[in-house]
Image: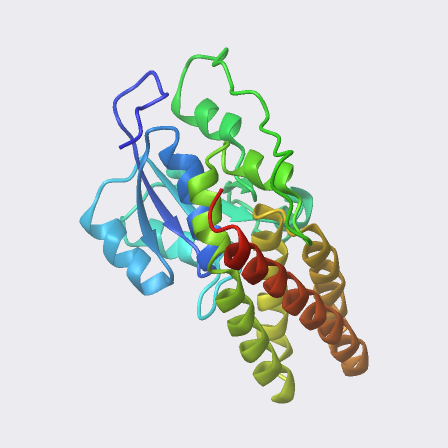
Amino acid sequence: MHESNLSCPRKTVLLVDDDEICRCVTSEILENLGVTVHHAADAGRAICLAKANHYDLILLDLYMPSMNGIDLARLLQESGAAAEDRIFLLTGEEPEAVLKKIQAGNTLRIFHKPLDKAQVMSFFSTQKNEELPEAVTAQTVKIKGFDMSLALANFLGNESAFFSILREFPRYGATFISDYSSYLKAKNIKECLRLAHSLKGSSLMIGATEINRVAKELESACYSASDVQRIEEAYKKIEAKILEASESVKNHFQHHGNP
């Protein structure tokens, strides 16, 4: 159990995100602050949890299948399950772009992915001068395709949590490739866009900077829905990057195990 770093009673957060990696990384950051985290991968589960529990903070991923974070926030408010001042959208998109999508009169606020510890502490605590841990650097472990310093900084230096998630990356990557190729074959560009956006956020969280760069290209291509060839070319690039990174991860654990 993590010791609370907040100068207030233990807080409880509802985290709603369909992306497995994003849920794990965000949870790790929150739990390192001594926060209790409940998870939901979809709107239905989120609504059930919000009605059954009191949450000090609710984090809603902006892009999710069946219902996006903005619509889910409205539904939670209309049903009386949560007040607007406790709901934040969670996204890898720039805040200015998100604000354009929020209807006038809606004052939802935004947390950026990867979640910033200082932002969370400022929301929960009245203490303005909380001492933050120094940035963590990893100089001994190197895995091709991953910026270890960035990854461990996102995990607040918790190597065990990071490598636990990294071990699952090949499975995560294979699922992405399978789902994306199916949506692309069916010309379902809306779902292609959602998956590209999700990968953009999750890849940055685990330090996969090359995948993050190409995921941005893929997301941009999806916005030009009429140019299917551009989307297919970007997908081939991201597929190659995922397979390459997956092999690096497999080789690491085969030869080194966890550090």
Give the colouring mode of the picture: rainbow
Q: Nearer the viewer, residue 164 or 121?
A: 164
Nearer the observer, 7 or 98: 7
Q: Left or right: 89 with respect to 180?
A: left
Q: Residue visible at 23% across and 40% down?
A: 54
Farthest residue to the left: give it.
52
Q: Residue shown at 48%/48% (left/top)?
A: 163
Q: Residue 255: horizontal and vertical position, in percent?
A: 54, 55
Residue that appears at 25% across and 22% down = 9
Judging depth in this view, the residue of 113 and 176 nearest the camera is: 176
Where residue 241 appears, as percent x and y from the top left, is: 70, 65
* Residue 112 versus residue 209 in the image, above or below: above
Position in image of residue 185 (x %, y %)? 63, 88
Q: Is residue 179 left or right of residue 2?
A: right
Q: Is residue 215 visible?
A: yes
> Camera-side residue: 153 or 51?
153
What residue is drawn where x is 69% and y is 50%? 209
Residue located farthest toward the bottom when viewing the structure as drawn: 186
The answer to whether 50 is drawn above or below residue 19 in the figure is: above
Which part of the image, by quadrant, shows the N terminus?
A: top left
Query: Which x, y percent locates residue 144?
Result: 68, 53
